[in-house]
């Protein structure tokens, strides 16, 4: 990058020199790199085109997941979620043993790699909830269930300062990674007190209806609240709220 000096400041392009303004400073640089037309046509860039195709496919799938879950992601730190999802989805694409390189898909990859993915990079579900839970995915009916035993909040949960209650959230998703559509259903427990000696066992269930040819994905999370005069205020504590992909059933 070269800075422009003199009375006349330029913006635009003259032959192979680009003039532009960056952070209040006028700069100039020579055009370089490989043209998009050459990458699209030159046989020597075939591998680049293949990589670009699959990277783009992973990026679109990441966007589908994030947009489908929507507001469910708000209580969690999703700052780097897109990058982390793309990395995982590219790994899945590379396990597709049906299609040629560049044409490989998520739908035909090892979707089991999704299981265990933590949506909040600041907190893992296992560091907040210390009890084992059961999960089930019924492909015949589209019913997804999570069962949590009764627990002792003081010893079985790690909660932020100021929290008085917690809530469990469970979501089921049937993503179609080919046409970039998805069905999502979610449910929540009641607000459960952190001051009670025992929190009752919980069963969370959702039913998906449009899933016959798509994977079924199950997600479990926990959020913390402060109760004031009968109102529950989310603490949005990234260090304690957790959301995890706990189950996958391929089509």
Image (cartoon, rainbow, N blue to C red):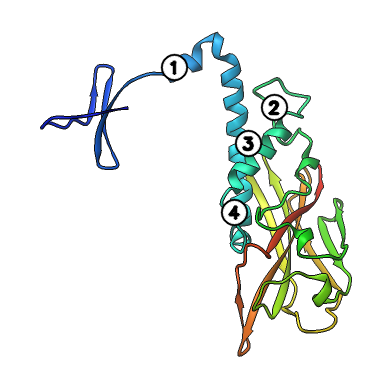
The residue depicted at 72 percent of the width and 28 percent of the height is 94
Labels 3, 4: front one: 4
Specify few, some or many for label 3: CA neighbours under 10 Å numbering under 14, 14-19, or 20 or more. Answer: many
The residue depicted at 79 percent of the width and 36 percent of the height is 110
Of labels 3 and 4, earlier in sequence is: 3
Of labels 3 and 2, earlier in sequence is: 3
Q: Is residue 92 found left or right of 85 in the rendered image?
A: right
- Tag 4 residue: 78
| Viewer-proximal residue among 69 and 232 | 232
Specify few, some or many for label 2: CA neighbours under 10 Å numbering under 14, 14-19, or 20 or more. Answer: many
**Relative vertical location of residue 97 with respect to residue 80 in this rendering, above or below:** above
Q: In the rendered image, is residue 251 in sight? A: no
Of labels 2 and 1, earlier in sequence is: 1
Q: CA distance from mark 3 to mark 4?
A: 17 Å
Q: In the rendered image, is residue 227 in sight? A: yes
- Tag 3 residue: 58
Labels 2, 1: front one: 1
| Viewer-proximal residue among 232 and 68 | 232
Question: Looking at the image, which residue sits at the far left?
Answer: 7
Q: Position of residue 97 (x, y in %)?
A: 78, 25
Dot 2 falls on a residue whose secondary structure is loop
Q: CA distance from mark 4 to mark 2?
A: 27 Å
Question: Looking at the image, which residue sits at the far top?
Answer: 43
Of labels 3 and 1, earlier in sequence is: 1
Of labels 4 and 2, earlier in sequence is: 4
Q: Is residue 45 found left or right of 199 in the rendered image?
A: left
- Tag 1 residue: 34
Of labels 1 and 4, earlier in sequence is: 1
Q: Position of residue 119 (x, y in %)?
A: 67, 53
């Amino acid at each position: 990058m070269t800075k422009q000096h003199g009375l006349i400041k330029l913006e635009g392009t003259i032959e192979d020199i680009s003039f532009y303004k960056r952070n209040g400073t006028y700069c100039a640089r020579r055009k370089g790199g490989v043209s998009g037309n050459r990458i699209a046509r030159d046989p020597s860039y075939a591998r680049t085109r293949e990589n670009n195709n699959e990277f783009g496919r992973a990026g679109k799938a990441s966007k589908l997941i994030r947009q489908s879950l929507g507001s469910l992601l708000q209580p969690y730190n999703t700052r780097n979620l897109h990058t982390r999802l793309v990395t995982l989805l590219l790994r899945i694409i590379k396990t597709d043993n049906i299609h040629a390189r560049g044409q490989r898909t998520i739908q035909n990859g090892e979707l089991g790699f999704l299981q265990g993915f933590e949506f909040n990079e600041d907190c893992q579900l296992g560091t907040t909830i210390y009890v084992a839970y059961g999960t089930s995915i019924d492909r015949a009916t589209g019913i997804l269930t999570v069962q949590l035993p009764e627990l002792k909040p003081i010893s079985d949960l790690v909660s932020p300062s100021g929290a008085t209650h917690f809530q469990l959230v469970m979501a089921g998703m049937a993503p179609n990674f080919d046409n970039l559509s998805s069905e999502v259903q979610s449910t929540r427990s009641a607000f459960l007190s952190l001051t009670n000696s025992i929190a009752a066992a919980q069963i969370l269930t959702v039913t998906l209806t449009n899933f016959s040819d798509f994977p079924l994905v199950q997600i479990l999370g926990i959020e913390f609240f402060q109760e004031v005069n009968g109102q529950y205020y989310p603490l949005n504590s990234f260090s304690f709220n957790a959301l995890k992909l706990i189950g996958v059933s391929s089509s």
